[in-house]
Every structure is written in C-alpha cells, then in structure tokens.
Image (cartoon, grey):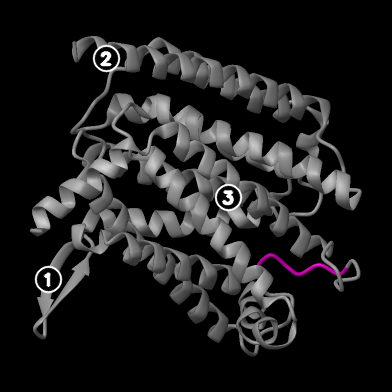
Amino acid sequence: MSEKSGQQTDTGLYARFGIAALCFGYFAAYVPYGMLTKMLTKGLLPSQSGHGFDGFVIQPAMIMGSLFFMVVFITVKGWWKYATHRTIAGLSIPVPRWFTFVSGLCTAGQVITTTMAYTFSGVSIVFAMLLMRGGVLIMAPVIDLIARRRKRRIYWPSWVAALLSLGAVLAAVFDDAGTVLTVLCAVDISLYLFVYFFRLLFMSNQAKSDDEGEKIRYFAEEQLVANPALLLVLALSALAGMHMEANTIPNKLWQGFTWFLQDSGFFWVAFLNGIFSAGTGLFGGLIYLDKRENTFTVPANRVASVLAGVLATYLLAFFYNQSLPSRSELIGASMVVAAIVFLAYRSVVEKRARLRAQG
C-alpha cells in the first residue's frame, strides 16, 4: 500500500471518530485525572496519612507519564508520517512548523497550569474548572470572528451553548467560593487563558478544515514540542534550584526529579496520572481540530470537563469525605447540561442535512 492510500485510510477512520465519542473519551480521562491530582496533593491515598505532596513536586513524574503516552500512542497509530519531515544525516526526522512549534509551547503551558489549578488549598476542582472553562468560552467567538485565514459563521445553537456555559461560570464566580481565589491561583488561571488563546487561534488559522490529514499533521507536530519542551524547562529549573531553599519553586521541582522519583513511593501513581492527563490532551486536541467553529467545539470540550469535575468531586466526597459541590457549582453544572442539549441539536440537524444531500 502506498503512503498516500494509507493516509486516506487513517484519516477516514479519524473522520468516523465523531465529536461525541471524543467528548466521552475526554470525560473518561478527566475524572481520574482530577481525582488523582487532588488525592496526591491532599494526602488522600493509602499510606500518605494525610500528608499531601506539593503540586510542583509531582509535576516531573506526571510530565514523564504524559510524554510516554503520547509517544506510544502516535507511534502505534502511525501518525508521525503525517508530520513535516526533514532529512538530517540521512534520516527522515519529523519536525514542527513554526506555528505548530508555538502551539506546542502553548500546550505545554496549558498542561502545567491546569494541573496547578487543582492543587491550590481551598479551591475546589469544580470552581477552578469553571473559571478556566469560562475564560475559554469567552474567547471562542472572538477567535472565530478574528481568525485571519478561516473566519467561520457562528450558528445560533453554538451561541446559546456558549452563553449557557458562561452563565455556569458566573454562577460560581459570584458565589462565596470566589473569596478563596488566591493571587497565585489567579496568576495561574490567567496564564492558562493566555496560552489557550494563541493555541486556538493557530488551530483556527491552520488546521480547522475538511482535510483530516492536516488535522493529524497539526496534532502530531504539536506533540513533538509540548511535553518534551515542558520536561526540559522543568529539568533546567530543577537544576537551578538544587541548592535553593526548600520552599522555592525550583527546589520543589528538584525534589520532584530526585526524592519523589526515588524514595516517595508514589512515583508510579503520579506517572499514571500523567497518562490520564495526556488522555485529556489527546481527546481535547482532536475536539478543537474539528472543522466547525470554536463557538461549537469549545463548549463541547468544556461541557465534558465540567461534568467530569462534578463527578470527580462527588466521588471524592463519597469515598474520602471531601466537600460536596456548592449550590452555585451545581447550578453551573445544570446550565452546562442545558448547553449539551443545544450542541446535540446542532449535531443532529447537520447529520440530517448530510443524509438529505446524499439522496
């Protein structure tokens, strides 16, 4: 089989892997990811005895797990062949283009800021998630309107879903839970939104189209950069913090690369959590690369993660006596469910239109 025919088969398979299945995969990966992050940092796992690990200490092991998963998955799927290649010393090496390189750096920032948001004391999974998701929801229609190369029409069900999802965020922000938002948490979420904006903008301009092969090419090239760059930055920061005080961030990273990996006894738990994190990155990235407008794909992604956060919070409350979601968080989750209805309506209408067009 030629490379061209092989690509057609692979992209056809990807095209049939609909957005509903991608959202379910995102949800299924996010529940254990959110739970394990809280359990590791709050000391809820057996033999932790209530002594949790700092969020920066567990980062190296998690990034190792995420990098392992992405390399294995893309290799098994054969997606490296879609990436741009250059011949170096007689070998054909996959390399990113400039915009997938920048997008990969943004993805790296997104990974670490997401994990850190779930480690701050007094900030619930649902509250942190609603803040982050709400900011991206606000950006989605803006990106659709300003995308230079591929502007998209925003259909009314997408507007309604986005507004409902935004309402879910506002319900949490104006609740008393907003008083626990520390300066460090606010900076973390601001950085999360900053890198997310540019990642979505590059995706919109370069990869959201009918060309399924280009979507896989973009994703593979982005992953060439994301986790390797993040692991390298963490390692360099850790080396700089080798002799710093124990409460500094670089020294915490140094502990993560040394003591946590060798003597903590929880390296493989954090490594596994990194695999779940990579699962959210895989399904989430493919959702965003859907050819439809960001005002449709972003709520679809955000809905899955918010519902996953609610379920994770209930599971932690049931099994580990943690706090239940607040009333405002449940109101927000209900509005997110309403957004699902409008997104499903949009999908059903489009499917019927395609069937009519086919005869």
Q: Which of 352 and 331 is in front in this view?
A: 352
Residue underneath mark 2: 355
Residue 86 got which mark? 1
Q: Do the numbered discs 3 and 2 sit on residues whose CB atoms are within 8 Å?
A: no
The quadrant of the picture occupied by the C terminus is top left
Q: Which amino acid does label 2 sit on?
A: Leu
In reply to whether residue 281 is colored magenta, the answer given is: no
Residue 260 got which mark? none
Disc 1 from disc 2: Cα separation = 42 Å
The mark total stands at: 3
The image position of residue 48, as x and y in percent, is 85, 71
Q: What residue type is labelled 1?
A: Arg
Disc 1 from disc 3: Cα separation = 34 Å
Q: Is 149 positioned to the left or the right of 237 in the image?
A: left
The image position of residue 133, as x and y in percent, is 56, 36
Q: Can residue 148 be seen in this view?
A: yes
Number of the front mark, 1 or 3:
3
